[in-house]
Amino acid sequence: MLLKKQTVWLLTMLSLVIVLSVYYVTLDPNQGTNMATTVNNESNEAEEQGADGEKQQDAGENDAETGEKSSTKEVSPTGSDQTFETMRMEVTDERNRLIEELTIRLSNTELTAAERDEANEMIKQLRTINQKETILETFIVDMNFDAAFVQADGEQVKVTVKSDELTKGQTNDIIRLVFDEIPDVENVTVEVKQAKSSN
């Protein structure tokens, strides 16, 4: 009976993943961004009205002081660059495939307790690294980069940012951020993709 429940649960989750994947692939990327931008703009207008009529002249100063972004950068942690979104999707899809294989393996009743623990630990690690990469991408985009892509592979992390230039200070801030989020990493590589050349 337990095996049937696990099978039903697994099939339900796989169906959900497939439905969401199809929806995501068929979704017009501009449509989702426009909706989020509209909501974001409405919330910014409400904040401005609630500030007793005080307005700041420079939006960049406002962003720096409040720590908030008033652009679509809140919507996608990788930013608005299609190349970066594609790279993120490929890495996430590969990890989801590995998680799916491990989940199917867990449904095997002949596995020992040690093998089950190992598979569960691998699933947990894959999910954790996905979350940490997404968090890092969000933080890096909040540092006024057009887009960011973070890929952790064992003890190495590769960070690619989209910007016109990358200063040593920005590079050090990114490296420090990576070490704060993923303490056991040994090597961090930061690359820049020129924003002007991709337009």
Image (cartoon, rainbow, N blue to C red):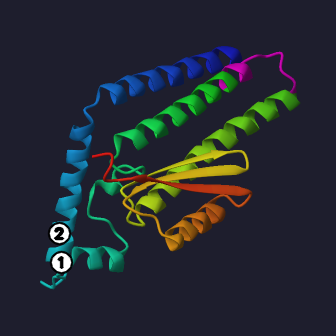
Q: CA distance from mark 1 to mark 2?
A: 6 Å
Q: Residue at x 52, y 74 (%)?
A: 169
Residue type, mark 1 in image: Gly
Instruction: Establish if 48 lies above or below 40.
Output: below
Predominant SS of the magenta segment: loop
Q: Are marks 1 and 2 in contact (CB under 8 Å)?
A: yes
Residue type, mark 2 in image: Ala
Is residue 5 highlighted in magenta? no
Q: Quadrant of residue 125?
A: top right
Q: Position of residue 73 (x, y in %)?
A: 33, 56
The span shown in magenta is: 103-112
Callout 2 environment at 10 Å: few (<14), some (14 to 19), or many (20+)? few
Q: Which residue position holds label 1? A: 50
- 18 or 172: nearer the eye? 172
Q: Position of residue 170 (x, y in %)?
A: 50, 69
Q: Position of residue 136 (x, y in %)?
A: 53, 57
Q: Which mark is residue 46?
A: 2
